[in-house]
Structures are given as C-alpha cells and as structure tokens.
Image (spheres, rainbow, N blue to C red):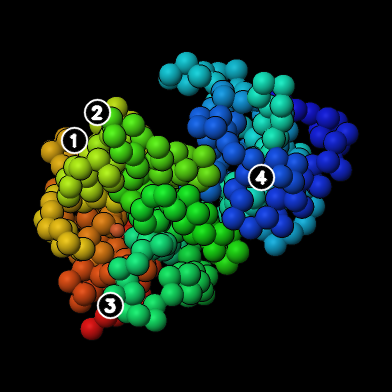
Amino acid sequence: MFISRRDFLKTAGVAAGAAAACTILPGMAYTAQGAAEKIAPGTTAVSSPSFAAPAFVMPGQPIPCKSTGAATIDKAWLMPQGGGEPVPLDHYLEKMLNDDGTSPEFLAAEKPLEPGLYNLFVTAGRGGKQRIERQPHAVAVFDSFPRDFQFGVISDIHFGDFRIAHVLPDFDTAAAMRREIAILNDSGVQFCLCCGDLCNIPPKTKNELLEYMDILENHARFPVLSAPGNHDGYAAGAGGGKITSDTFEHWTRNLGPLTCEARFGGVSLIGVNTYEKPAAERNLYGGLGQDMDQGAITAAQLARLDAALEAASGRGGATIMFGHHNPTNTVVDKNGMFTIKPFSETGRSEFLGLLEKRRPEALFCGHVHGVFEETHAATRILTAPTAGSVPYDNSHPIGILIVTVKDAQISNVETVEIARVK
Ligand SMILES: [Fe+2]
C-alpha cells in the first residue's frame, strides 16, 4: 500500500490546490505544485494508465496500473473531465505474480466511479522531492461494454506541418481537428484509435504533441489509444552521432508508453510501435535520407505481440491491431519529396508472419495519407486518411474513419471527409 485514504485526506487541500494549478496551465502535461518542471527522461512514476494508454473500466472495477519504479507513487487521485471534486485513489499490488515475476498493480477509488472521462494525477516522489504528474483522459469509466458500438480512427494529424499550406492555403490544423472531434462526439464513438504522426519535426515536436493533447482534452468526450508514427520518433543531433532531442522521449514523458492494449465490448485492441529503431537511425539530421522514415519492429516487440494476440484469440470477439506503417509495402509512400517503401526489412516479414499465424481481424495503419484496404491472410489492413496533412497524390480525402462494430465484429468502416485538395 503506497497511500491511504487518511493520508490523502490530511493533504486534500494541497492536492486540490495542485490540481487547480495544473488545470490553469494549458499545454503543461506535468506540473509541480503550480510551477512547470522539466522532467528528466525515464523518471515518470506511472507508465499507464496515461493519455496514450488509457484504462477502460466499469464503475467499481479497479484500474490496472503500471508504475515505472523510477519514482514512488506517494498519492494518486482523479479529476472528472469538466470539473468536480478530486477522487482519491489507493495504489496497491496483488500478491499473485505475473508471468514475468512482477505483481499486478491497481488504482482503486473507495466508491464506484461515475461513468465519464478522468484526468489522473500522481504525486511522485524521487530523491526526497515530490512533484505532480498529470495525465489527461487517462481513465475512462463506462457504464457497460456493449458488443455493438462505434469507434473512430484518427491518423497523421501532423501539427506543425507546413506542407499542407502549399496545397490548401487556408487549412487550419487545429480547427480541422476540432471539427473531427465534434464529428466523433456527435457519432457517439466509445473511443478512438490513433495511428501516429501527431507532430512534424524537431525541435518543436514537444509543443506539437502537447497541442494535440490539449485539443483532445478540451473537446473530446472519448478516450484515445495512441500508437506512434515516424514523426513522433524523429530525433535530432549533428556531429558524432550525438542525439540532442528525441521526440520519443517527449512522447513517453508526456503521453505515456509507445504501445498499449485494451479491451472493449468483446473486442481486443492492440497497439504496435512500427518505428522501433535506435535513436541514431531516427536522426532527422543524421544524413540517412529517405530510409529514416521507414518502419521497423524488433524481435522483442514481436514476441509481446505474439503473446497478446494469442491471449486475445482465447477471449473471442475481433482482435484489432493499430500502428503506423503497413508491413505489406503494397502502397508506396509518395508523400513529400520521396518515393519510398513504407516498411524496412527489419522485422517486416516476421510481422507479416505473425499476422498469418495469429490471424487478427484487422490492422489499422496510417503513414501514406490515403484510404486503402487489402487483406493479408485473414487480416483486413485498412489505411486511414490523414486528418490534417497533405493527402496521398493530392487526391485522397482529409478526414477520419468511423468503424461500426456489431456483436464484437467489424461490420462497417466509413471514411468521413472534412477537406479535399482537388
Ligand atoms: Fe504522416
């Protein structure tokens, strides 16, 4: 037990004050008692639930939690979206062990939570100091998990991307995203999958990621499970291969982990990081040329996916994967100045082999900024349109997907267009 309700109540005033301080600092994913603090890599206390890897629970269910071990969880609480009283949480470990020898961790409220979206706050302790970590929309409480529902797919919004102005001079990325969120809200989607490329290029990627988070936090009535794209993993550095900025570090400090899993209405959701390579091979200024954009996946992640797919197949219902790069390379990336195969040979055939072996129902991708569909073995591979950048061949729509699920299987995929170049 890391905290108790009594300890929380003793400091409830401080907690409420810190929460208020956080909510009046737009764009700050983390704050310390009202003052913005630079977070060193790898020092966040909680990996999930988080903005990129939200927890889906019903009232009364404990919230699965993964701590990093880099800082203690001295206190945790939720703030309901739209305001309200802080809800104190206990953090506890189960006595039983996971397969890897770790203990399952949970956060739990004293009373059943009302359905809705919650921001998670954690007082993290490290080296005798404390700070507040904040994760918007980290916990979604549903009154049920119906087997008939809709979800959205958003990809390649590309905050900070100057290319869209060349083909649509009046296009406003933030306004486009607000419109897409309004469409998803009106459709009553239960959640959204994000297939990556939230930002553009270093050194501004941190602020671009935060702008994306702010817009969702302030407008969306649904949680988003996120997988990163190549733009979310660009590093910067020149001379001797020294990396001075790594967008993945901004992602993991501010959004959460690079992969996530969830289950809703009999459907298993599995996120994939398809830009899994060393920072030197993600260095935008490292002279690597067009190869730098290509997808890659390691044996370690493939093993995790294999286990996740096996577990999902035993639970019934559709298994839906989502990531950025399509491993088939059927559609060549013609965006920008390059013509390039989306996926490198690092893990590509193994990833395709995994689809053949485990036969998930669907894999949603982004990257090529166009609407495409193909089938590999038993898996429908669906590519989402760009939500806010230059579309494929300037001829595909800019927009999102809305997916309808009936009895835990995909029954319809609709492209919702919000803009078009020609
Ligand atoms: Fe993109």
State if disc 1 and disc 4 touch (CB < 8 Å).
Answer: no
Please tell me which residue is depicted at 34% across the width and 31% down the height of the picture.
Answer: 242
Residue type at mark 2 is Ala
| Mark 1 secondary-structure assignment | loop
The image position of residue 7, as x and y in percent, is 83, 30
Quadrant of the picture in which ligand 1 is shown = bottom left
Circle 4 Cα neighbour tier, 10 Å, few/some/many (<14 / 14–19 / ≥20): some
Residue type at mark 4 is Ala
Residue identifier under label 4: 36
The answer to whether residue 155 shows anywhere in this view is no
Residue 167's tag is: 3
| Mark 4 secondary-structure assignment | loop
Tell me if 347 is positioned left or right of 25 in this view. left
> Earlier along the polypeptide chain: callout 1 or callout 3?
3
> Earlier along the polypeptide chain: callout 3 or callout 4?
4
Please tell me which residue is depicted at 69% across the width and 35% down the height of the picture.
Answer: 131
Real-space CA distance between mark 4 and mark 1, rounded to the nearest whole angstrom: 40 Å
Cβ of disc 2 within 8 Å of ligand 1?
no
The image position of residue 189, as x and y in percent, is 48, 65
The residue furthest bottom is: 422
> Earlier along the polypeptide chain: callout 1 or callout 2?
2
The image position of residue 303, as x and y in percent, is 28, 28
> Earlier along the polypeptide chain: callout 2 or callout 4?
4
Tell me if 318 is positioned left or right of 281 in this view. right
Give the answer, above or below, for where 97 lies relative to 278: above
Real-space CA distance between mark 1 and mark 3, rounded to the nearest whole angstrom: 35 Å
